[in-house]
Image (cartoon, rainbow, N blue to C red):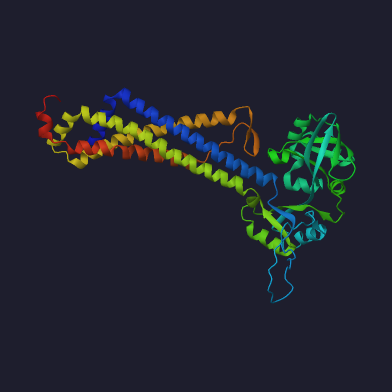
């Protein structure tokens, strides 16, 4: 019986070929748009996480003490007066990690050497860079270049110049591509660095790098010693320490342990990028909401063709019921039709989505996607999202067939056959 119902459902759809093809095309377009949009948003998130894990530190030891000395306002155990602090002005202390070499020794100890794979102390300094008539505030980051390479792979990201020139040149600069573009800097250009306090210094561009992370490409690398001089820090102090760990996705417990042992604030990359990760999550929810809304629109198209079929095939339906077809079998026949239209449209849309995703991924244009800059668009090829959207589309199309099928099941054969207008 199911075979018979299926054959009749196919003949109904073929009988209204133009309307059927139009509905299938509408379902296909909506499916393609949803899969492509989801691929773009998921691809951006996956690309961001991959880039952060490969380039940025997994845990950062900040120059912020976790156990500051509390301020005691009351000297007596029992008091009759209450003291309030109004406009308490204190000296703004510079955040710094003291005796950082001892902390590096701790990370290299047997207790942590398997978990911590790379360590790089750094010094951050906000300075003014001047070249001719151009000037721009920049972030100067002092590093030990070999240790920094273990964290960010900076050697492979240099697009002009080389590390050897940086190491040999006094007051050498490795300039992020964004800074180089903004200030029109080229190799061997002379740049004057003016710190907030202290004398200005003449520096030389030894290389230009491009990491793909906008915040990193908007900075300048110098030697650790030079940055300490700029910031007025002694040799045993740095702004922080960057760490690479064996498991970057399960690093919260390690960060907590290191914070307890060192006494300094230790932040994971997830914590430092929490706002962006939250934004990506919200975008994902919005995309899946669109899946539902657009799927409902496609379902109206499927319901429309089936309502028309019920209206035009009322006599045939009446004859079938008079020959012994039950109401359940009539409902099943129209559900078959909704399922076939939805499945055909979703599969065609899936194939079209593969083409559109390939097209966007291969576009030879550089785009700034949120915190990243990439050539082409970052697209996700996770088959789970393909199957999920196709499945939702087919399900909605199938459910859309229930209303017209219920109408067909309620038709009275005698009433329909007596009506000469049919």
Query: Viewed as shown, does residue 140 lie left or right of 296?
Result: right
Determine the residue positioned at 35% across, 35% down: 299
Q: Quadrant of residue 30?
A: top left
Residue farthest to the bottom, as pictured: 78
Residue farthest to the front, as pictured: 80
Query: Viewed as shown, does residue 371 lie left or right of 310?
Result: right
Q: Quadrant of residue 43?
A: top right
Determine the residue positioned at 65% across, 42% down: 51
Residue farthest to the top, as pictured: 18
Quarter placement of the C terminus: top left
Quarter placement of the N terminus: top left
Determine the residue positioned at 29% across, 34% down: 337
Q: Position of residue 223 (x, y in %)?
A: 84, 45
Q: How many discs appear?
A: 0
Q: Is there any visible trace of residue 380 in the rendered image?
A: no
Could you say which is closer to the camera, residue 246 or residue 417? 417
Query: Viewed as shown, does residue 252 lie left or right of 283?
Result: right
Q: Quadrant of residue 127?
A: top right
Q: Position of residue 180 (x, y in %)?
A: 77, 32
Q: Position of residue 14 (x, y in %)?
A: 28, 26
Query: Viewed as shown, does residue 328 lie left or right of 40?
Result: left
Q: Is there any visible trace of residue 359 in the rendered image?
A: yes
Q: Position of residue 246 (x, y in %)?
A: 67, 54
Determine the residue positioned at 72% across, 71% down: 74
């Amino acid at each position: 019986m199911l075979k018979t119902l299926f054959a009749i459902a196919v003949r109904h759809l073929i009988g209204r070929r133009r309307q059927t093809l139009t509905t299938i095309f509408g379902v296909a377009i909506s499916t393609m748009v949803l899969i492509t949009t989801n691929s773009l948003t998921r691809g951006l998130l996956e690309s961001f996480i991959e880039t952060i894990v490969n380039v940025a530190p997994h845990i950062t030891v900040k120059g912020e003490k976790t156990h500051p000395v509390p301020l005691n306002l009351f000297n007596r155990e029992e008091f009759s007066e209450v003291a309030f602090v109004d406009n308490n002005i204190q000296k703004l202390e510079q955040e710094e990690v003291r005796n950082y070499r001892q902390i590096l020794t701790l990370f290299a100890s047997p207790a942590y050497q398997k978990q911590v794979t790379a360590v790089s102390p750094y010094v951050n300094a906000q300075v003014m860079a001047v070249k001719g008539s151009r000037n721009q505030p920049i972030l100067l980051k002092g590093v030990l270049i070999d240790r920094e390479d273990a964290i960010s792979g900076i050697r492979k990201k240099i697009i002009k110049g080389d590390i050897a020139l940086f190491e040999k040149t006094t007051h050498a600069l490795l300039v992020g591509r964004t800074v180089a573009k903004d200030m029109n800097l080229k190799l061997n250009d002379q740049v004057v660095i003016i710190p907030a306090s202290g004398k200005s210094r003449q520096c030389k561009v030894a290389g230009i790098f491009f990491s793909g992370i906008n915040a990193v490409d908007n900075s300048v690398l110098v030697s650790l010693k030079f940055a300490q001089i700029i910031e007025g820090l002694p040799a045993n102090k740095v702004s922080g320490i960057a760490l690479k760990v064996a498991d970057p996705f399960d690093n919260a417990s390690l960060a907590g342990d290191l914070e307890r042992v060192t006494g300094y604030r230790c932040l994971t990359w997830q914590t430092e990028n929490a706002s962006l990760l939250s934004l990506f999550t919200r975008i994902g929810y919005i995309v899946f909401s669109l899946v539902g809304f657009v799927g409902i629109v496609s379902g109206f198209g499927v319901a429309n063709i089936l309502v028309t079929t019920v209206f035009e095939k009322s006599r045939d339906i009446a004859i079938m019921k008079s020959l012994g077809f039950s109401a359940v079998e009539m409902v099943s026949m129209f559900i078959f039709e909704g399922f076939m239209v939805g499945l055909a449209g979703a599969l065609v849309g899936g194939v079209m989505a593969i083409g559109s995703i390939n097209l966007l991924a291969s576009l030879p244009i550089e785009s700034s996607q949120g915190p990243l800059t990439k050539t082409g668009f970052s697209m996700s090829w996770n088959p789970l999202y393909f199957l999920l959207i196709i499945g939702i589309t087919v399900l909605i199309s199938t459910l859309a067939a229930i209303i017209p099928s219920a109408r067909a099941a309620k038709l009275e054969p005698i009433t329909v056959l007596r009506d000469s207008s049919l």
